[in-house]
Image (cartoon, rainbow, N blue to C red):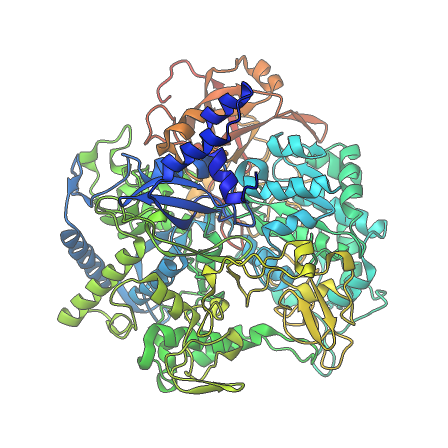
Amino acid sequence: MGVTRRGFLKLTGAGAAGLALARFGIAPAPVAAYAAQLKIEGAKEFISICPFCSCGCNVLVHVRDGKIISVEGDPDFPISGGGLCAKGASLLSLHTSPQRLTKPLYRAPGATDWEEKDWDWMMERVARRIKDQRDKDFKATNAEGKVVNRVESMFHLGSSQVSNEEAAVLHQMVRAFGIVHFDHQARICHSPSVPALAECFGRGAMTNHYNDIGNADAILIMGSNCAEHHPMTFKWVIKAKEKGAVVMHVDPKFSRTSARSHFHVPIRSGTDIAFLGGMIKYILENKKYFAEYMLEYTNASFIVGEKYTFKDGMFSGFDPKKKKYDKSQWAFEKDSKGRVKRDRNLQHPRCVFNLLKEHYDRYDLDRVSQVTGVSKENLLRVYEAYCATGRPDKAGTIIYALGWTQHSVGVQNIRLSGLVQQLLGNIGIAGGGINALRGEPNVQGTTDHALLYGYLPGYHSTPTANYQTLGDYLKAYTPVTNDPMSINWWGNRPKYVVSLLKSWYGDNATKENDFCYSLVPKMDPGVDYSHLYIFDRMYKGEIKGGLCFGHNPCQSIPNIHKVRKAWDDLDWVVMGEVFHNETTDNWRRPGIDPKTVKTEVFLLPSAYRAEKDGTISNSGRWHMWHYKAAEPLGMSRNMGEMFVEIMNRVKALYAKEGGAFPEPILKADYPEAFDAEAVARRINGVFTTEVTVGKKTYKRGQLVPGFPHLKDDGSTTSMNWLYCGGYTEEEGNLAKRRDLTQTPMQARIGLYPGFAWAWPMNRRVLYNRASVDKNGKPFNPDKTVIAWQDGKWIGDVPDGGYPPMAQEGGKYPFIMTTEGHSQLFGPGREDGPFPEHYEPAETPLTKNPFSGQMHNPCMKVIESDVDKLAAHGDPRFPIVLTTYSLTEHWCSGSETRNAPPLLEAEPQQYVEMSHELAKEKGIQNGDVVIVESLRGKTEAVAMVTVRIRPFNVMGKTTHLVGMPFCFGWSKPKCGDSTNRVTVSIGDPNTTIPEYKACLVNLYKAEKVTEL
């Protein structure tokens, strides 16, 4: 019997009944078909997207009589093929859960219970709170008298659960209010990815896409447990393995990923740079690098200026008082024409290649082994297997996630993987690249739309007080090159910024008023407005109120006791959520008398994913539309509607009453009602006057066909230049495409260019012009991404439409870097142009074996938290704690703990430890233990297992324990947050906290109080 993939899914959906019959030899097909028919008979089918990890798995939602009755995987989705992980399989129960928030809830100051209120009452009071706070604390100028037009006493903390369209209107609203304490979940999960990958290649995004993992010949999974945390990703790892790829997993503990890899290599948490630094040394000493690629496409031949030095763990230019480097001392040497000097023979002692050799010469096998706890045999096993890809006919890919990002050297962990891939020639090719497995469906999109204080949408730096005019700002942030072969795409920044301002302020934004640049709030240079500092200022009483949508910081932030106490001291807070969690109900947590908490709380019930339209962008930059299948449960609303109503009610109050600097609000070109389709058009951008592009004339209001056509004269708008080209006059909303057609060349590598749309301009593999030689011939014809034929590119959309380097008009392939080359030497990061091993903020060692500098010298340590850091090798806390997530739960667990099957599978907090440590501590499997650090204590059930083993570090035994971070007190008997013990310090580039390595002790609990 012939059965389509979707038909097969429906047949197998009969479940246990059909399987039971099959065991007795009875053909299950008729029973299965009948059961499936009954299940969805009379139902309408809608395509939605799973709201959990960043694969963005498409799901089919069946609705009957206005109610969701079934959610199953979409067999036409190229990544999953219809599969779903445990969380995705729970979507029906989550959408229909009796625990859903369905009515607006109000908590008065000192109240002991919630009150139900109507939307009108809530929104009017929320608007009043925002306006009054803004008027009271608005700052027109800073301490130096420079215009800043901002409010410091309000904050916004946001989520990657919002769609791109919701994110766009949210960002515009927050900037109009003048809020600078503006951050979202990416800060604490993947914020290092952008500066690290951008420093290497020019963009901060995952370089390839999920299906492309199946094209690899070697796969290094490090800082990720993708079999459990991104299960549909691991499908492509298995496909590559079946075709002969070597799969290796370097991770502190053994997991399902390890079990399906060729080998697992345990490593002490926080020593990834030592491990990869040893790999760099191995590549260089054994000449495993792809010489042609390295010479032509990387900056290996660039000559660094004479001021650059490195000595005993420190780069030149460090100011110990400011804990900052003068990065001008890392500049390249230039000739009389302003071009970077190069030595193509790689003989100059200050060329990048030789500086790289010198820097990693200390990373020998003995020292790396002693620091990481990895045997020399295992080091060589990984080095040999992975570095075999440093040739044109092989491809190696690297997969990472929070195991790399959540460190005081998070950016440099990722940077170093970029160095490895540049040397081996693994960027821009099929089966290559660096796969940043983000933890939520729209982390990519909400980062693109900049729900983070330091960026405007499209990765433009937020203006600071140093730049009082648009001209000053653009001059500071628009790079210039004198090399005619460099495309230097960021040289187009003025076009994108002006188009953004035009989209925000419409006809009010003119050349004469700097396109309303003065209305954008300005930060003070050098001031950090991210999570850790928000809560520190909240704790000190400097922040009085704010907005928190789809985020659970009272569960998710380190040193959680301080965070919860800070939240208690807010005057007011507005939250949008699907379920109650530790943050919504912080005022009534265990041990607290609600009557003592003064915070006025507005809790707004949010629609869930299948109850709204919009797009998400998965980690591979696939921009995909999800459809509204049913009306939101009860009185809940989508967050876009909430944002638009809040903004417009505040706008109405200013129109009626006046107030502090009302112009950014009153002059805003802002929608009167939220409509995802209309906002998607605004994100793409339109012409504001009649314009001719090629042979086609576009009228005012028509869509801009792509970002190359954006202008800096006010004739175009775009809320995000990266997405310009994703919604066209000719084809409409490209995020809705479902075409699986491929050319034979594309099909060989699984490109799927007609399914949805990928930014930029539907390019599926970034930097793909580095997959060919200087004449445009693919390095590996068997896995061609693009090729130059008959004067044009075929295959993927080329990264920059210029010819290959050796052809007339040819350009370098790395179009987003100033000099057109990928960067082995990266002079733009805060803590050095080369990654260097530093010990975590809390370490069992008393000396860094690589240098005299113990920790990252630029590490962010909040002054009031210094006394909460354990000393080096503190004997009171001899055990290293690392954290991780679970297949069954997502992030803080605030959603998935409401799905009974998931909670039954993983019901409570535990601490995983080796048999050796358990014996030493007198602990049995299942005992309740106390885990203690200098920040506090938490309780957990002991899981004694062989998955974690002791490490031999510098000749001594070092124990490691692991705890998941998805459990909290809001669900009875789950236990409380691991963040009661984690350390509150930050990476110097992004201030991401160091969740993955801190010092603790543990002992058997005498009395169980929390589980």
Residue 865 spot, x, y in % from top left:
43, 42
Q: Is residue 23 above or below residue 697?
A: above
Q: In front here: 872 or 1004? A: 1004
Q: Locate residue 318 relative to residue 289 in the image: left or right.
A: left
- Residue 12 shows in this picture: yes
Q: Residue at x 13, y 70 (%)?
A: 656
Q: In front here: 555 or 8? A: 8
State the image quarter where residue 225 is shown: top right
Image quarter in which the C terminus is found: top left
Q: In front here: 688 or 199? A: 688
- Residue 428 shows in this picture: no
Q: In front here: 352 or 439? A: 439
Q: Residue at x 76, y 64 (%)?
A: 778
Residue 186 spot, x, y in % from top left:
46, 51
Q: Is residue 590 above or below residue 929?
A: below
Residue 610 spot, x, y in % from top left:
36, 48
State the image quarter where residue 485 is shown: bottom right
Image quarter in which the N terminus is found: top right
Q: Locate residue 243 relative to residue 15 in the image: left or right.
A: right
Residue 250 spot, x, y in % from top left:
67, 37
All told, the count of numbered labels is: 0
Q: Is residue 585 above or below residue 609?
A: above
Q: Residue at x 48, y 26 (%)?
A: 18
State the image quarter where residue 559 is shown: top left
